[in-house]
């Protein structure tokens, strides 16, 4: 079984150029490709595990980077499909955000601040089914710091490749604002509802 590159229906965005999205999608395709390459190489080397143990170990270490790069970008591009959709303030997601962070606007402010963390990485909002709460987290690179067993509700790519064709590094706050302008909140609220429903299974 191999991982398959997904196709996304992303309309013209405000503040994020078509060229930027197209180049970003090529980078995503690279993560899919290299996830498959690593799995294939490990399968070949596993015919002599003892002799190839060091190489296999390093490939397994690299696999986390490639796989999470693939999956993070799938979360990211899903959120930009079909044009922007306003948040439904009656959604259960908003209720949970308010319960956790005080108000919806307070959470948005905190998440945007998280996205401005220095360095490359991802700002992610998770749902923890064990405690029935939402958690903001910063992920270094693609894979360092992911919170085990939690469900990704919102993912914002903060590597320079996500905005450098439109904004210089000192303007990345403009990119964050553009992301939220173009966000399909229906995708986010449906992820949350699905995560909660799976909790009860």
Image (spheres, rainbow, N blue to C red):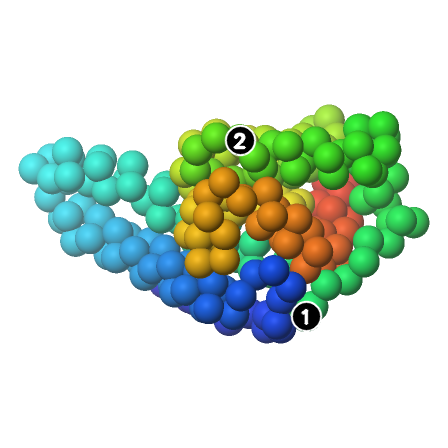
- The residue tagged 1 is 82
Quarter occupied by residue 49: top left
For mark 2, does the 10 Å Cα neighbourhood hold few (<14), some (14 to 19), or many (20 or more) residues? few
Question: Which is nearer the N-term, disc 2 or disc 1?
Answer: 1
Residue name at image x 79 percent, y 32 percent: 106
Q: Position of residue 59 (x, y in %)?
A: 23, 42
Left or right position of 165 against 53:
right
Disc 2 marks which residue?
Answer: 117
- 181 or 154, which lies in front? 181
* Occupied quadrant, residue 97: top right
- Cα separation, mark 2 vs mark 1, equals 29 Å
Query: Residue 94: in sight, yes or no?
Result: yes
Q: Residue furthest left?
A: 51
Residue positioned 70% across, 31% down in the render: 110
Q: Image quadrant for the N terminus?
A: bottom left
- From the viewer's perspective, tell me whether residue 106 is left or right of residue 179: right
In front: 196, or 133?
A: 133
Q: Is residue 146 above or below residue 83?
A: above
Query: Which of the two marks, 2 or 1, is nearer to us in this view?
Result: 2
Is 143 or 150 nearer to us in this picture?
Answer: 143
Residue ID at (81%, 38%): 105
Instruction: Specify few, some or many for label 1: CA neighbours under 10 Å numbering under 14, 14-19, or 20 or more.
Output: some
Q: Eyeballing the image, is 144 above or below 196?
A: above
């Amino acid at each position: 079984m191999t991982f398959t590159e997904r196709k996304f229906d992303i309309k013209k965005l405000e503040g994020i150029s078509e060229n930027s999205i197209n180049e970003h999608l090529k980078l995503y395709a690279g993560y899919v490709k290299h996830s498959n390459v690593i799995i294939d190489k490990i399968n070949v080397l596993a015919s002599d595990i003892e002799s190839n143990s060091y190489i296999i170990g390093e490939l397994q270490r690299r696999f986390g980077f490639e796989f999470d790069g693939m999956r993070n970008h799938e979360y990211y591009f899903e959120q930009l499909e079909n044009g922007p959709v306003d948040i439904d303030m009656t959604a259960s997601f908003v209720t949970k955000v308010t319960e956790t962070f005080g108000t919806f606007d307070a959470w948005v402010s905190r998440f945007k601040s998280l996205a401005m963390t220095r360095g490359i990485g991802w700002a992610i909002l998770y749902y923890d089914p064990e405690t029935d709460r939402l958690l903001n987290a910063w992920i270094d690179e693609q894979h360092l710091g992911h919170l085990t067993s939690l469900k990704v509700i919102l993912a914002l790519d903060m590597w320079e490749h996500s905005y450098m064709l439109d904004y210089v590094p000192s303007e990345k706050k403009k990119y964050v604002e553009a992301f939220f302008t173009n966000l399909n909140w229906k995708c986010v609220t449906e992820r949350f509802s699905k995560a909660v429903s799976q909790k009860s299974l």
